[in-house]
Image (spheres, rainbow, N blue to C red):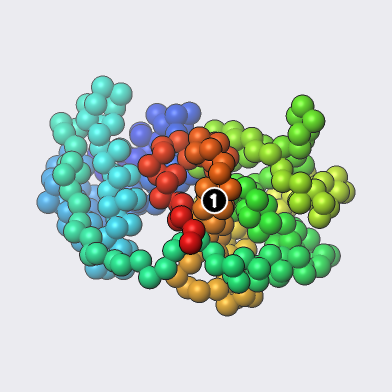
Amino acid sequence: MSAYDLFDRWAAYSTDKRAANTLKRYRASFRSLAAFVGERDVRSLTSDDLFGWAEWRRDHDGVSARAINKNDLVAASSIFRWAAGRSGRRLISSNPVAGVSLDEPRIAAERARTFREDEIAAILRAASAIEDNAENPTRSNARRWCPWLAAYSGARIAELTNLEKRDVRNEAGIVVVDLRVTKAGELRTIPLHGHLIEQGFLNFVKTSLSETLFYHRARHRKNAETSPAEQQAKALATWVRATVRLDPRVDPNHGWRHTWKTRALGAGIEERLRDAITGHRIASVGRRYETPSL
């Protein structure tokens, strides 16, 4: 049984149990493992083989030790653990990834991951200056609205680029946004800030000719590994970094998530409400996004 065979069996079992993004991330990691071990039977793999793969990812592919530990080895361990258990019908005798990790070099943070005041102003000013582009309206719409939406919600940019007209609605007199495509695979409903309404976001949604607000399905190849919303999110990050000459040490998309959590902390919003809005289910994870302000 090859690594590809094992992944296919796990994916078939997990389709209705794991988020689509998790399946995608695990597939990428297992594809790398399959390339490393070739046609070897996964039942013959040892912890030394998995450690060798991790080193190969670091030295050959240039992936950081932290990313390998956090992503590749977590993915491989999850799949092998399933294969060794009852759900996986004990396809293998044990999990060869157990206890395998790379030593991570200590990296001193050079700055907080939140945006600074001038960066916030520059990004939002650039977003507000965007004009409609008749040739690619969803691209200009993403640039115009997604930074502002992220600034007032801390949502992941790919959660926002997935929005459809139906996701913006009124509930009990409150305008809310349903984030249907999330990292956890669970619907998250958040309130829409009044300043976004003042800027005309509701009118933009109402007059949109496309049900999907920030991408056109017809412009993208079906069954592509990267979804249209994710492609749009990556394009937005590239535009932000180039337009405002953003400090390379801060993420042009995810920086909003850190910034909103920090601002919400400073505003006295209760922790469980901060986490509910951003979708952090583990308090210790949510706190890592918050930097107490001076």
Q: Name the residue nearer the viewer: 84 or 202.
A: 202
Q: Which residue is drawn at 40% across and 44% down?
A: 285
Q: Can residue 144 be seen in this view?
A: yes
Q: Residue furthest front?
A: 294
Q: Residues within 10 Å of mark 1 (few under 14, many from 20)?
A: some
Residue 193 horizontal/vertical position (percent): 72, 46
Q: Position of residue 80 (x, y in %)?
A: 25, 37
- Which is more toward the observer, 268 or 34? 268
Q: As drawn, is 236 to the left or to the right of 285? A: right
Give the quadrant of residue 145. Answer: bottom right
Whether residue 12 is visible to the viewer of this picture, yes or no, is no
Residue placed most toward the observer, 83 or 129: 129
Q: Is residue 156 left or right of residue 31?
A: right
Residue at 24% across, 26% down: 85
Quarter of the rendering occupied by the N terminus: top left
The amino acid on which the numbered mark 1 sits, given as a three-letter code, is Gly
- For label 1, the SS is helix
Residue that carries the numbered disc 1 in the rendered image: 266
Task: Give percent across and percent down for residue 65.
Answer: 27, 60
Residue occupying image coordinates x 52% and y 53%: 262
Residue at 59%, 33% (x, y): give it.
Answer: 187
Total marks in image: 1
Residue 82, position in %: x, y? Answer: 28, 31
From this view, report whether residue 83 is shown above or below residue 103. Answer: above
